Amino acid sequence: MTLTLADILSAARVVRGQADGTPLVPSPGMEERTGGEVLLKLESMQPMGAFKLRGALNAAAALTPEAPGVTCCSTGNHGRAVAWAARARGVRAVICMSNLVPQAKVDGIRALGGEVKIVGRSQDDAAAESRRLADEEGLTEIPPFDDPLVISGQGTIGLEMLAARPDIRTLLVPLSGGGLAAGVALAAKAVNPGVRVIGVSMDRGAAMVASLEAGRPVEVEEVASLADSLGGGIGLENRLTLAMCRDLLDDVVQVTEDEIYTAMQVLYWEDRIVAEGACAAGHAALLSGRVRDAAAPVATIVTGRNPDMDIFTRVVTGQDVTLGDMIVKGRAYAR
Ligand SMILES: *Cc1c(COP(=O)(O)O)cnc(C)c1O
């Protein structure tokens, strides 16, 4: 199956009035540091706090009228988005989680109207339960990235960015499972084939980067990161996003935890944005100097505003952060 601009245009009709039209704003601080215009697409202003609402709404819109509801096993922004989209559509959302998930995340999903089902002791157990609910109770599974409707929904971001600023030359996209990068690259290049689209991941535990290098889906060891939304695998049965990222991304850049730390400070103190570490990936890549041919205008996507507030506060106030076996050394923000 191949996705086209038509799929993204149809997703744009679905999300209109519900999850579209987030602002594209200049970043004077980054302009000063890089010498060229830098634009930020604020998906952090989505009602449930992240761009994933677009894909979830597009997937939920395809349900048949008799469909009883939806299910997934994400504890992060995808789970929140699925809960929100199901409520908007008036159907059940059952979000499956293992008993290791912190209560705050359970409460967050419930507050958005989602039913939480706690099963087993691992993410795999939660995934198995979600699949069982799909098989036995007829709920529709909404995958977090490897799905044509989800990719098309995320792609509407690229359409909006290029419609607002057709002169964007470099587009930096935080990269995990690749639904965002695949959709945005497809849309942006359909409008302007000359735009360079570059995925940005952290330098440890980046499954898409490892898979692109291997030429097939591979598993990597999951490690804690300031960019926690960029963790996780791409699925060994990956159908769409690996091939799309291979064909549509011009480059992939990896950033260190130290670089993400500094970028989160810049995003907060200069852009005045509360956002997750994943959202600072574009800033980190630019500031690292590792983006080849970063022709301006450069644009990046601030993907979500649901950080762990304890870690976030430590970063912006310059304290050490412990991530598993690693300590990111604190340092005061310096302009
Ligand atoms: C999911 C997510 C991403 C990565 O999106 P993929 O489609 O998995 O590549 C980036 N940032 C945030 C905040 C997310 O929730």
Image (cartoon, helix red, strand yellow):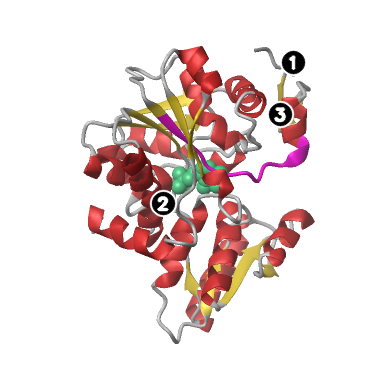
* Chain-order first, disc 1 or disc 2: 2
The quadrant in which the N terminus is found is: bottom left
Q: Is residue 298 left or right of residue 273?
A: left
The quadrant in which the C terminus is found is: top right
Q: Amino acid at mark 1?
A: Ala
Against 332, residue 323 (above or below) is below
Against 154, residue 17 (above or below) is below
Q: Which residue is mark 3?
A: 325
Instruction: Indicate yes or no: mark 2 CB to ligand 1 under 8 Å.
Output: yes
Q: Residue at position x 63%, y 27% from top?
A: 264
Against 50, residue 133 (above or below) is below
**In this rendering, the label closer to the viewer, 3 or 1:** 1
Q: Amino acid at mark 2?
A: Gln
* Percent position of residue 173, x then y: 43, 36
Q: CA distance from mark 3 to mark 1?
A: 22 Å
Q: Which residue is mark 1?
A: 332
* Chain-order first, disc 3 or disc 1: 3
Q: Which residues are magenta?
A: 299-310
